[in-house]
Structures are given as C-alpha cells and as structure tokens.
Amino acid sequence: MVRRIEHIGIAVKDLEAANELYESLLGVRPYKEEAVASEGVRTSFFRTGESKVELLEATKEDSAIAKFIEKRGEGIHHIAFEVEDIEGEIVRLQAAGFRILNEKPKRGADNKLVCFVHPRSANGVLVELCQEIRNT
C-alpha cells in the first residue's frame, strides 16, 4: 500500500544551475547531493513539507535521464511513492496487470530500495516505488 508521495523527479541538463533555480524557487538549499553510478545520474534533493523534489542530471550519454532529456527535454521525469513493503507491492501490482521494469528492488538514491512501473501501465507516468533501507 502506498503511504505518501515521496518525491517528484525532475530531469535537468545542468545540476548546479538547476540547484540555484530551485533554491530560489523553494527558498531552501538541497539537503543532499549524490551520484548513483548504476543509473548514470547525479542527484540533489530538496525537502518540501512531507515530500521532496529530486533533480537528476545524466552522467552517461546512454542513461535513462540522458535519453529522456534528448526525447522530451528537461522536466518531470517520475513520481515516487513511499511503500512499506516494496517486494509485496511488486507482487501486488504485477497481479493487477502492471508492468514492472525491475522485478527485484535495487538500491537507489537517498538510502532507498526502488523499482519502477512502466509508463504504459500508469497513463504515461513513470512511477517509482521506494522503501527506506532498514539498517539491521
């Protein structure tokens, strides 16, 4: 079950310039910047109440973000929902007919396990499910 909107991901060409723009827009500085080598991106996160805004800059020409910007330009890339049990949600959504892009959760930015629902299954929106990684 979805608990809340965790963040909205925005694809940008230049992370530093976008950070400046969003600092002015939101009135706060990013609380974290992080590279996710497996996805070929650099990210920064801004808190906005209970949710966040994630800016994503491609670090590889063949990354999903680079392809997105090439095809559509900068803008909203995905919406992420926080879930309690990501593996259970994958099973539930597959049973309901949703196409899951990665059937096993993978490590994402900001200490999260993530998986993605194909946009064709969600009215053209790339949906990310994320679960906080619990330290055991």
Image (cartoon, grey):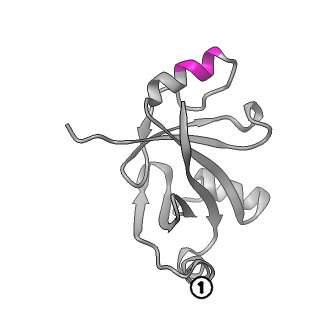
**Vertically, is 127 above or below 97?**
below
Farthest residue, direction left: 136
Residue at image location 63% in from the left, 68% down from the top? 12
Residue 44, given in percent of the width and then of the height, sits at 48, 67
Q: How many marks?
A: 1
Residue 61, given in percent of the width and then of the height, sits at 59, 59
Residue 62, given in percent of the width and then of the height, sits at 60, 53
Residue 65, given in percent of the width and then of the height, sits at 62, 56
* Residue type highlighted by circle 1: Ser
For the C terminus, give its image quadrant. Answer: top left
Horizontally, residue 125 falls left or right of residue 60, namely: right
User: From which residue to which does the magenta span run?
Assistant: 91-95
In this view of the protein, which residue sits in the foreground, 109 or 5? 5
Report the magenta stretch's main SS.
Answer: helix
Horizontally, residue 31 falls left or right of residue 89, namely: left
Element assignment for label 1: helix
For the N terminus, give its image quadrant. Answer: top right
Farthest residue, direction top: 95
The magenta stretch spans residue 42: no
Name the residue carrying label 1: 24
Near mark 1 (Cα within 10 A), the count class, few <14, some 14-19 or many ≥20, is few
State the image quarter where residue 95 is shown: top right
Residue at image location 46% in from the left, 31% down from the top? 86
